[in-house]
Image (tube, rainbow, N blue to C red):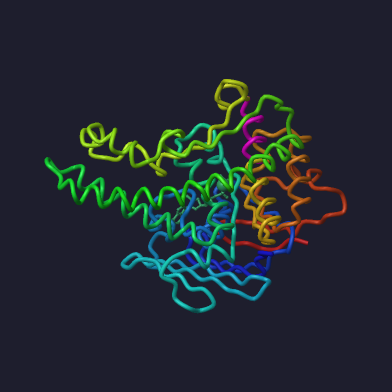
Amino acid sequence: MSVISRLDVLNVRNLSNVKLLPAQKLNLIFGDNGSGKTSLLEAIHLLGLGRSFRSQKLDSIIQNEKEECVVFCELAEGASIGLSKSRRQGHQLKLMGEKQRNWADAARHLPVQILNSESFLLLEGSSKVRRRYLDWGVFHVEQDFVGAWRKAAKCLAHRNLLLKQRSPDRDQLAAWDIELCRLSELIDSSRSEYFALLCPALLETVAKLIDLPDLNLQYCRGWDNTADLASVLKAGLVKDLKYGATQHGPHRADLVVKIGRSDAVEILSRGQQKLLVSAMKVAQGYLLSQLIGVKSVYLLDDLPSELDASNRRRVCALLDELDCQVFMTCVDPEDLEKSWPAGLMPRKFHVEHGKIAQRY
Ligand SMILES: Nc1ncnc2c1ncn2[C@@H]1O[C@H](COP(=O)(O)OP(=O)(O)OP(=O)(O)O)[C@@H](O)[C@H]1O
Ligand SMILES: [Mg+2]
């Protein structure tokens, strides 16, 4: 179970020096616009995923006029994760005080799911967003996935570099193709195995939130289902050379979400979309705890927007069932007062001009 028992945030956006002892279950972060609520979630997200959900470059999260930002957390199970990022150097990540070369081990200790205004991109954004969503689950349940994924990304980069040359060396191209095809098979089989588990879990979760009998999900692997990648690459070489980039492969995989024959985003209201993406996020947390017994930490930025009172209650009831740690933000705590099941008292934190105080 992943539970943050202590969180220290230094110089992240307007949060100069914040120390928090969060509750094991529900934490309510409230405060006026611009007070620093989203920045707090961003700090947690950084520890679990190594990236911000707002900025491509980590530099923008460092507080103006400051040289460095630091986020540190202790988990109830005993592990600790620390991240520092200075303006002059790259970031440094530590797990239990030990320097990490990449994010994989830290991320396994702290699976984080976020639900915010960006989550709509799961339906309306590019396939990259849905691949990331799918791969989050595959990464956590399948240990070897990340290695295959990294190697495939390298192969693709090399292949694309060759494709950009006027007359690429065909032998080199063939060598990269062999390795890319091998890795692509591994990636595809991990993804499709995970999808086969995710799909029923997701439909079940959706049914608890919204009546969508025609909802259907499909995993597309990124190349013709009836052909092997080697022949697809061969047949597509002229096009690949024209674009200077590989047009088919696992980097083009997608998760298609439809209502009947139409894309969900074209049919559903904004509130219904929010319920659907909430279900998508909750289903992954549920599956993770079923498959590997690890609970995710949920970050919910401004849940009240777009959802009426009864739907807020439904989403909160689902999270309550998951029995995981939740950080929820809102401007006015009254907006969420009756959303949570009776008897569960959130730990409340008031954010004001970058300072956070627990409220009793
Ligand atoms: N690098 C930075 N250094 C200092 N302050 C920053 C930096 N980046 C953003 N800010 C400021 O931090 C403040 C907190 O932003 P944040 O998005 O966390 O607020 P919020 O409480 O979520 O507000 P809202 O209710 O509007 O969503 C804002 O005033 C923002 O302008
Ligand atoms: Mg905000």
* Quarter-of-image position of residue 271: top right
**Magenta residues (range):** 269-278
Q: Is residue 115 above or below residue 24?
A: above
Q: Nearer the viewer, residue 331 or 24?
A: 24
Residue 139 placement (x, y as % from top left):
53, 56
Q: Is residue 150 above or below residue 67?
A: above
Residue 288 placement (x, y as % from top left):
65, 55
Residue 343 placement (x, y as % from top left):
87, 53
181 left or right of 314 in image: left
Q: Residue at x 44, y 57 (%)?
A: 61
259 left or right of 167 in image: right
Q: Nearer the viewer, residue 271 or 167?
A: 167
Is residue 201 magenta-colored? no
Q: Residue at x 27, y 40 (%)?
A: 245
250 left or right of 48 in image: left
Q: Is residue 255 above or below residue 60?
A: above
The dominant secondary structure in magenta is helix
Q: Is residue 160 above or below residue 242?
A: below
68 left or right of 35 in image: left
**Count of numbered marks:** 0
Q: Residue at x 23, y 39 (%)?
A: 244
> Quadrant of the image for the C terminus?
bottom right
Residue 76 placement (x, y as % from top left):
68, 71
* Quarter-of-image position of residue 63: bottom left
> Quadrant of the image for the N terminus?
bottom right
Residue at the extreme bottom: 97
Is residue 270 magenta-colored? yes
* Quarter-of-image position of residue 217: top right
